[in-house]
Amino acid sequence: MSHWLFKTEPSAYSWDDLVRDGRAVWDGITNALALKNLRAVRAGDSVILYHTGSERQSVGVARVIAAPYVDPKAKDPRRAVVDIAPVAPLPRPVTLEQLKADPAFADWDLLRLPRLSVVPVPADLWKRLMKLGEYT
């Protein structure tokens, strides 16, 4: 099982929206590297949902429930989507400032490539993120 961080602008689609809906098609990814990452996602993988914009914090854990498939709404067959479902909110959201202050995250793609919307999370960083978020 792999771990991922998916970014979203909360005014467009938030953690609360995912909880309300019970599941979502994760779409709208256009960046080539983000699409490459999305195509590597598998059913059963864990996702940390990260709110961008004024919040800039990790807010909840989700699970991938369907492997990547071609975006049925896009005219480009290279565009992919996955289906996700909420697992639980983080008891304590983890802010971007916390991540930047923690040397363990210094080389992580979230900080190195801040515009990337789908980011792999190595196992050691996932554990650290869950600890910071007080998620057990």
Image (spheres, grey):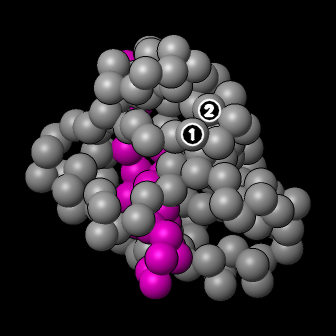
Mark 1 vs 2, N-terminal side: 1
Work out whether residue 76 or residue 59 is closer to the camera in this orientation and state it. 76
| Percent coordinates x, y for residue 58 in the rendering | 49, 66
The residue located at (30%, 45%) in the rendering is 87
The residue located at (66%, 53%) in the rendering is 116
User: What secondary structure prevails in the magenta region?
Assistant: strand
Give residue 32's quadrant in the image: top right
Per the model, the C-alpha gap separating discs 1 and 2 is: 7 Å
State left or right for residue 99 relative to residue 55: right
| Percent coordinates x, y for residue 94 in the rendering | 53, 74
Q: Quadrant of the C terminus?
A: bottom left
The amino acid type found where label 1 is placed reads Thr
Q: Secondary structure at mark 1?
A: loop
| Percent coordinates x, y for residue 127 in the rendering | 63, 53
| Percent coordinates x, y for residue 24 in the rendering | 26, 37
- Residue 57, compared with residue 70, is above or below; it is below
Q: Is residue 122 magenta?
A: no
Work out whether residue 103 or residue 24 is closer to the camera in this orientation and state it. 24
Tell me which segment is drawn in magenta.
47-66
Q: Are marks 1 and 2 in contact (CB under 8 Å)?
A: yes
Closest to the camera, between mark 1 and mark 2, is: 1
Q: Secondary structure at mark 2?
A: helix
The residue located at (28%, 45%) in the rendering is 86
Location of mark 2 (residue): 35
The residue located at (40%, 26%) in the rendering is 74
- Label number found at residue 30: 1
**Is residue 15 visible in this depiction of the protein?**
no
State left or right for residue 87 relative to residue 53: left
